[in-house]
Amino acid sequence: MSAEAGIGQAVRTGRRGERPLGARIVYEVSKFIRKKPLGAFGAVVLLVLVGMAALAPIITPYGPLQQGTGPALAPPSADHLAGTDQFGRDVFTRIVYGSQISLQVSIGATVLAIIPATTFGMMCAYFRGPFDLIFQRVVDAFQAIPGLILLITIVSILGSGLYNVILALAIPASITGSRLQRAASMQVTGRDYVLAARSLGATDARIITRYILPNIMAPIIIVVSLGFGGYILAESSLSFLGYGVPPPAPSWGGMLASDGRRYMYVAPHMFIAPAIALSVVVFGVNMFGDAMRDILDPRLRGSG
Amino acid sequence: MLAAGVSSAGGVHMAKYVIRRLIGMVPTWLIIMFMVVFMVRLIPGSVVDLLLQEQGGGGSYQEGIDRAAIEKRLGLSDPVYVQYAKYVVGVAQGDLGESLWDNQPVTTLIAQRVPVTAQVALVAIVTSVAVSIPVGVMSAVRRDTPVDYLLRSISILGISVPGFAIGTAIVIFPTLWWGVTVSFKYVTFAEDPIQHLKLIIPPAVVLGVQLSASVARLTRTMMLEVLQEDYIRTARAKGLRETKVIVKHALKNALIPVVTVLGIQITNLIGGSVISETIFAIPGLGRLMVSSITARDYPVVQGIVVMTAVFVMLMNLAVDVSYGYLDPRARPA
């Protein structure tokens, strides 16, 4: 029901064509800033993150792995905005390039998780029966095992490396994430338009892709925007336990968890700088996700 | 509330419901055991390799014979599905097996660690409730004011900073700024109660702060929803004082879903304990788990996962049952 309301609204605003597109975008954006200042802040953080990732070589003169750009473990200065690490690498540069890793982790894991999660969720809701029954027990099982323990085990099996970490983050999420999509699909499958499509002889595949999927877009968007920050945090927790994206890649979690902690007494900037970068981004993403949830579905109760 | 809410017929009804739910959990337990038995064995580098390394015979010529002997002794020579079946039968009889490294029963190992983790978890939950509910209520009552924005920002910040970073900061900055060094030598409560509490409280507070972020947000959402209900308007119309309306009429109803979330968060709490126990060098379940994965101590890993999962599911059941008492509308049919 709620999912539909969101979609209905989107369709309505989409059809309203009295004002030129540009003016309408300006109007919508300024309304978003006025109504959701925290969400707008989050959107800015996201834009900065994407900008940093795309323009990294322009933003900073050093390379992320370039050693001896200055004295080792030097505190922040005009040449090295966030100081240098034990190899004389520029910490600010590593943070800028680290945004590429954060984006790869969060986008990669989100996409890899949401597609199977939505597919499973829709199939369970549509077909019900034994498939749903068994699959829901598997979801129960995944939910009962603490996430971090599951992640460590999966990374141990797959081996380390950026892509394996992404895959490891996506696997449990693709199972447990299906539950919300299932709940949303359940509300849609009983609707008259689904019955009408079926009585017209539409195939199951057509009903699922043409009638159910468009009507559960709102919860999908909410899950995506709220999950984004979670993956960045999870990668950092894995790094802390030695299962994250391996060095020398400038992953924020890795910088924070290994070198940052090792040198924190002599060079606290090595700990503080990535901690701030990571927290601001996750904070911004969460704020943005929150605002999206409020707009798309005020009644959806998230536990996050 | 318990006696008032449920008649004796309702009690029988509830008992049937609980039994039905417990039976319903059996397939999930079988799936969990299946997952964990297979997954730990999929981790490259088997326990036998590690044991052979340990014996120091790096280039032993008897490698083949030793290996077979060790596998046989540890019960690893059977096909995995046989090992799984044996494990399920063992668990059904309350036998979680023995550590592959020192032959201690897994139940003993877990029993030693549970009190430590449970203490940390308990303090964490108390902290989070004490912080999050006032914050959530405040935020809802002062909706869309600077107070609300500030409190919401802080609580979202609480889930945006990695737990290990907060934990590390707690350890580091007192030393850097004030030269205070924290001792991490673990002592039991009986040995030295004050030192024991000093060790338990920091990780518990770190976990509690993280927990309170989501609880505060949910409390806010629920309060906002409840404050729109007719009975709140009625209470106000009767001329009740606002504090009474909020505490007695609104909060009581708003807290129902919050209980569920606390139940769900227990899984996260146990996951988070892996990190906080590592930082603060606390010998709890989380650290045992990580070291057992590293050591490929299959029965210990299996035992912890299975016990945790059983506990989590029973907690969820307890939450569902309490739901019926807290909200008569939600009683299972």
Image: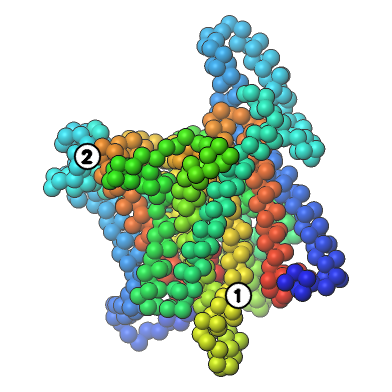
Front-most of residues B137 and B61: B137
Quadrant including the C terminus of chain B: bottom right
Between the residue at mark 1 and the residue at mark 2, the CA separation in whole angstroms equals 53 Å
Residue A84's mark? Answer: 2
Give me the residue at 13% from left, 47% from top.
Answer: A78
Label 2 element class: loop
In this rendering, position of residue A72 left or right of residue B283: left
Residue B252, disc: 1
A217 and A140: which is toward the camera: A140
User: Are tags 1 and 2 found on a single chain?
Assistant: no
Asked which secondary structure carries label 1, the reply is helix
Question: Relative to B293, does residue B307 appear above or below in the rendering?
Answer: below
Residue A109 got which mark? none
Residue B311 image point, x, y percent: 67, 49
User: What residue is rendered at 64% in x and 40% in y?
Assistant: B304
Q: In the displayed structure, does residue A129 sit left or right of residue B110?
A: right
Relative to A298, does residue B64 appear above or below in the rendering?
Answer: above
Mark 2: few/some/many CA within 10 Å (<14, 14-19, 20+): many
Q: Amino acid at mark 1?
A: Lys
Residue B203 can be seen, yes or no? no
Give the x, y percent position of residue A197.
65, 73
Q: As rendered, which of A92 and A222 lies closer to the eye?
A: A92
Q: Is residue A205 left or right of residue B156?
A: right
Mark 1 vs mark 2: give the one in front.
1
Residue appearing at x 58%, y 66% in the figure: B258
Extreme left residue here? A78
